[in-house]
Image (cartoon, rainbow, N blue to C red):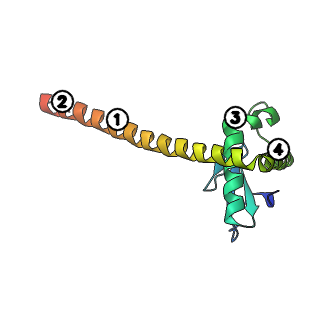
């Protein structure tokens, strides 16, 4: 089983060991993050291999909506740190028992994430091109 600690992130803290952040408020609770934001936990690990394993485990749990079962609160839903620890610990044990299948899943998730980022860049470029075309059209007609 992978060794990790989850604590509430404080903006004034810095971390020397490998780590990532886990969003704990809103409908995206459980989403792993590389950079901190308000309302997140920090997951500290002993080495980079454990960090990668746990990051992608959390990513998979978040994408599969596993954190939804633990949401509390009526106005702004949130997950508690104890439930987050428990879910990650149990899931880590299951994933470790099926290590080869989990590694394949991580590889697939990484590829999908990379492709998603490329598509987002392409969509932004298309949007910029649309704006430029319309801007040129309005500029030529004297309306802009």
Name the residue carrying label 3. 64
Residue 26 occupies quadrant: top right
Mark 2 touches mark 3? (CB < 8 Å): no
Give the Cα distance between marks 2 and 4: 55 Å
The local secondary structure at tag 2 comes to: helix
Name the residue carrying label 2. 137
Left/right placement of residue 114 relative to residue 127 reads right
Q: Locate residue 31, reporting x and y percent.
A: 67, 44
Left/right placement of residue 78 relative to residue 37 reads right
Mark 2 touches mark 1? (CB < 8 Å): no
Q: Nearer the viewer, mark 2 or mark 1?
A: 1
Residue 35 occupies quadrant: bottom right
Give the Cα distance between marks 4 and 3: 13 Å
Query: In this orientation, does residue 58 appear?
Result: no
Give the Cα distance between marks 2 and 3: 45 Å
Give the Cα distance between marks 2 and 1: 15 Å
Name the residue carrying label 4. 87
Number of marks in the rendered image: 4
Give the Cα distance between marks 1 and 4: 40 Å
Name the quadrant of the C terminus.
Answer: top left
Give the Cα distance between marks 1 and 3: 30 Å
Q: Name the foreground residue: 119 vs 14.
A: 119
């Amino acid at each position: 089983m992978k060794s990790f600690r989850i604590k509430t992130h404080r903006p004034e803290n810095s971390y020397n060991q490998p780590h990532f952040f886990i969003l704990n408020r809103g409908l995206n609770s459980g989403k792993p993050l590389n950079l901190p934001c308000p309302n997140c936990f920090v997951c500290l690990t002993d080495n980079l291999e454990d960090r990668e394993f746990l990051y992608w485990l959390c990513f998979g749990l978040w994408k599969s909506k596993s954190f939804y079962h633990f949401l509390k609160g009526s106005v702004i839903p949130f997950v508690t740190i104890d439930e987050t620890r428990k879910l990650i610990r149990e899931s880590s044990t299951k994933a470790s028992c099926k290590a080869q299948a989990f590694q394949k899943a991580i590889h697939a998730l990484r590829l999908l994430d990379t492709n998603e980022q490329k598509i987002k860049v392409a969509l932004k470029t298309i949007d910029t091109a649309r704006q430029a075309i319309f801007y040129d059209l309005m500029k030529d007609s004297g309306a802009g």
